[in-house]
Amino acid sequence: MAKANDKKVVEQKQQKIAEEQVEVKTEQTLETNEDKVNEQKKETVVIKKQAEITEDAKQTKHFAWLAYLLFFIPLLINKNSAFVRHNANEGLEINIFDAIGIILTCVGTCVKTSNATAHLLLIICTIVGLGLLVLTIITKIYMIVVSSQGKKVDTPWMWNIKIIK
């Protein structure tokens, strides 16, 4: 009778081990399927990123980057292109911030005062103006590189307003 009980216990343990192995295999299969789905999603994202370069962008990328130097030049060349209008809009936004930086720097350096508080405000004006100029220069370089590749990207740190429609 003890042998029969031992056999039942051994069989139960073997059955539990077999069930655990099936569960492990099922979990591994699920993980493998999830990995395949994630890889497919990554491939889809890569395809979408590659699809960002439109035919319009391919044709106009050679002069669209000029919008970051003087925003209206590409519009004179091809005003019907959506890619050119987008870059002209981004260039105008950056040039507005450029002008604000220049004005702040000029006010901070050209205005003379004997009042200590006003002098401190002028120093702050100069620092903010120079910081804004540095930020716009870095942004212009980035946007020129990206637009010359034919990619349509919004300015990273500015609002998303369409001044030029």
Image: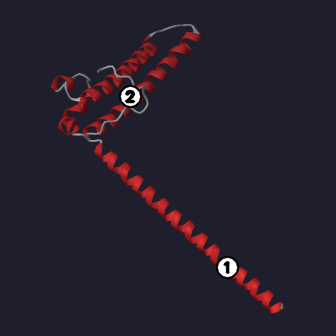
Quarter residue 58 falls in: top left
Rendered position, 22 above or below 30: below
Circle 2 residues within 10 Å: few <14, some 14–19, many ≥20: many
Asked whether residue 68 appears in the rendered view, the answer is no
Q: Which residue is mark 2?
A: 136
Residue closer to the observer: 88 or 132: 88
Please name whichever residue, 5 or 21, is drawn nearer the observer in this view of the structure.
Answer: 5
Disc 1 marks which amino acid?
A: Gln
Residue at x-position 34% and y-position 37%: 142
Q: For the C terminus, which image quadrant?
A: top left
Disc 2 + disc 1, Cβ < 8 Å: no
Q: Which residue lies at the image location 30% right of the left edge and 47% below the top edge?
A: 50
Rendered position, 107 above or below 89: above
Classify mark 2: helix, strand or loop: helix
Which quadrant holds residue 52? top left
Q: Residue 77, located in which quarter of the rendered image?
A: top left
* Count of numbered marks: 2
Q: Which residue is mark 1?
A: 15
* Image-based side of 41 in relation to 25, left or right: left
Is residue 142 at least partly visible in the picture? Answer: yes
User: What's the residue type where badge 2 is placed?
Assistant: Thr
Residue sitting at the far top:
114
First in sequence, mark 2 or 1: give its number.
1
Image coordinates for residue 76, horizontal then vertical, percent: 17, 22
